[in-house]
Image (cartoon, rainbow, N blue to C red):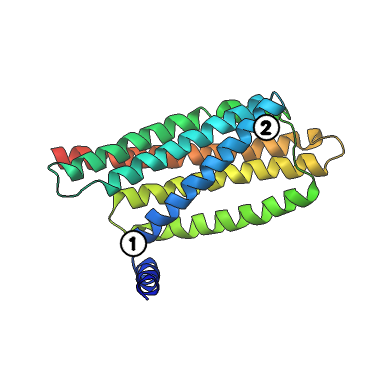
Amino acid sequence: MSRKTDARAFFAKWRADYDFKTLIGSTGAMLVTAAFAVYNGYLGIAHASPWHGGICVYYLLLHLLRLIVIRAERAPKDRAGADSRKERAVLAASGLLLALNLCLIGPFYLMVSQRRPVTLTLIPAIAMAAYTTYKVTMAAVNLKRKGRSDNRSVRFLRTLNFIDALLSIVTLQNTLIMVNSADGGRSMLPLTAATSGLIWAAMLAISIYELHAEWKRVHTREA
């Protein structure tokens, strides 16, 4: 009986508490990110692929960023300076996010120039497209809703999810082009380069905005 009561209380809080939903959802996203990192690491070794190796490192660092912010959020609130440490953790994560997205230029170049092995056939690629569509839709909706919360950790995690979704769009686009093109996607190179460049620029712009907002918040508080 107590288990049913606990389950009902959990789902009631899930529906009512936006911050709680974000933190639990981001904990699940950490597990998915870790799985993607392991999968890409395996493909990097199996195919001697710098692309998969780079994406493995990216997902590992993305996992680390979520872990930093979630651990800071779950730290005891009754300790002196707890709020300041949490804000500095989010600021550090924002700086690392910008650096991480700047480093994506290497994997993006490999992908656009078709220097990555395609490990999917058409049917798995379509399934990947369906999942990516869901992922992007939810990330966009939650990014718009993040203004509901004053919690900087929650707002940063929603931004991180959206950037993760943008990377999925680029990966999916290039996978579908290479799977469906007779020439391996070479004829689509201008389109691939243009769209990938625009999405990468959007990721950088969001990262810069997030870092600037966190920097301003921390130093305004300390002034």
Identity, as a three-letter code, of the amino acid under mark 1: Arg
Residue 42 found in image quarter: top right
**Dividing the image into 4 quarters, which one contains the C terminus?**
top left
Question: Crowding near pointer 2: few (<14 within 10 Å), some, many (20+)?
Answer: some
Q: Position of residue 183 (x, y in %)?
A: 85, 35
The residue that appears at 47% across and 38% down in the rendered structure is 62
Task: Identify the disc placed on residue 112.
Answer: none
SS of the residue at dot 1? helix
Q: Nearer the viewer, residue 155 or 69?
A: 69
- The answer to whether residue 149 is seen in the rendering is yes
Identity, as a three-letter code, of the amino acid under mark 2: Leu
Q: Nearer the viewer, residue 164 or 209?
A: 164
Residue 83 found in image quarter: top left
The residue that appears at 34% across and 71% down in the rendered structure is 9
Q: Position of residue 106 (x, y in %)?
A: 59, 25
Q: Mark 2 vs mark 1: which is more N-terminal?
A: 2
SS of the residue at dot 2? helix
- The answer to whether residue 197 is seen in the rendering is no
Q: Nearer the viewer, residue 207 or 3?
A: 3
Q: Position of residue 134 (x, y in %)?
A: 59, 58
Residue indicated by mark 2: 43
Residue 222 found in image quarter: top left
The Cα atoms of the two marked residues, 2 and 1, are separated by 40 Å
Question: Crowding near pointer 1: few (<14 within 10 Å), some, many (20+)?
Answer: few
Q: Position of residue 59 (x, y in %)?
A: 52, 37
Residue indicated by mark 1: 148
Q: Which residue extends farthest bottom?
A: 1
